[in-house]
């Protein structure tokens, strides 16, 4: 039950805006005033993650965010190179693939395209629409920030897998708790985290265009040679 957990925004994407920044752009277009206020309140622990999501969704509803707007965000989301091939190689070598993200499941699904078939599970925020395509509700993920470590720890315990058979790939400050699970942590294209912090990140690839670059940190030499 070897499993690689990937963060999404900035880890499996490159040269595009993160999901929530993209969403804010559309909100502004719809006339909303968007500030970093809610994020700051969350960071200052004035509101929790769920409240942050609820306040955000209220704003999305107020400014008439539609299913088509989410589809636009997905179209604006560009995958880093090699996602399909890297996932295929990992699967061929017996690794399961999961995505643990603070983004939005539907956007991740759409952005992954064909590579989605290799993914066992996506854990992220879920949005629901009414039949006419207007926003209905959001289920906030419990598994962002510290929650990412909680999710992976639960998975390790439930499946009785050795932490060495768990790998996490991420790029940001919301990924900084995962090392506490004992999983191997790999930093790619770091955004707001220090890739040289060896406690938090066991390996780091600071500027890559293709996610296949990290495979030597996961697969042994024989498996790699077979894949190439
Ligand atoms: Mg990220």
Image: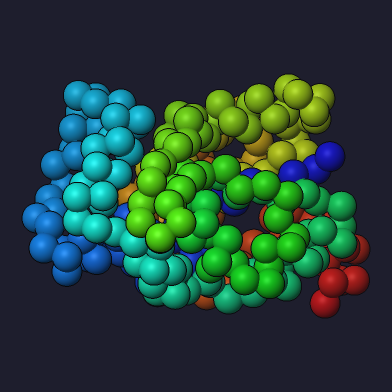
Report the residue at 52% width, 52% height from top. 105
Q: Position of residue 130 (x, y in %)?
A: 43, 52
Q: Residue furthest front?
A: 132
Q: Position of residue 122 (x, y in %)?
A: 61, 48
Residue 106 vs residue 80, the one in the foreground = 106
Is 146 rendered above or below residue 87? above
What coloring was used for the rendering?
rainbow
Report the residue at 11% width, 63% height from top. 31
Report the residue at 77% width, 49% height from top. 96
In which quadrant is the C terminus drawn? bottom right
How many dots with numbers?
Answer: 0
Residue 68 vs residue 77, the one in the foreground = 68
In which quadrant is the N terminus drawn? top right
- Left or right: residue 162 versus residue 26 is right
Q: Quadrant of residue 73?
A: bottom left
- Left or right: residue 74 versus residue 90 is left
Report the residue at 71% width, 55% height from top. 119
- Left or right: residue 27 versus residue 146 is left
Residue 54, visible in the rendered structure: yes
Q: Position of residue 199 (x, y in %)?
A: 51, 35
Residue 195, visible in the rendered structure: no
Residue 3 vs residue 105, the one in the foreground = 105
Q: Quadrant of residue 213?
A: bottom right
Q: Quadrant of residue 10?
A: bottom left
Q: Position of residue 28 (x, y in %)?
A: 15, 63
């Amino acid at each position: 039950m070897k499993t690689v957990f990937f963060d999404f925004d900035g880890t499996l994407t490159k040269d595009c805006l993160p999901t929530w920044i993209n969403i804010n752009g559309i909100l502004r277009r719809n006339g909303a005033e968007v500030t970093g206020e809610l994020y700051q309140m969350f960071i200052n622990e004035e509101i929790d993650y769920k409240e942050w999501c609820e306040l955000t969704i209220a704003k999305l509803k107020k400014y008439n965010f539609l299913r088509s707007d989410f589809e636009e965000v997905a179209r604006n989301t560009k995958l880093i190179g090699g996602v399909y091939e890297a996932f295929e190689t990992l699967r061929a070598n017996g690794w399961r693939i999961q995505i643990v993200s603070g983004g939005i499941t539907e956007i991740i699904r759409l952005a992954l395209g064909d590579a989605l078939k290799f993914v066992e599970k996506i854990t992220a925020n879920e949005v629901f629409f009414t039949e006419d395509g207007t926003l209905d509700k959001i289920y906030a993920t419990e598994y962002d920030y510290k929650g990412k470590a909680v999710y992976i720890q639960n998975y390790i315990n439930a499946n009785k897998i050795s932490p060495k058979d768990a790998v996490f790939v991420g790029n940001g400050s919301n990924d900084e708790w995962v090392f506490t699970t004992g999983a191997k942590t790999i930093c790619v294209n770091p955004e707001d985290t220090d890739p040289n912090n060896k406690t938090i990140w066991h390996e780091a690839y600071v500027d890559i265009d293709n996610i296949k670059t990290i495979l030597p940190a996961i697969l042994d030499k024989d498996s790699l040679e077979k894949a190439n």
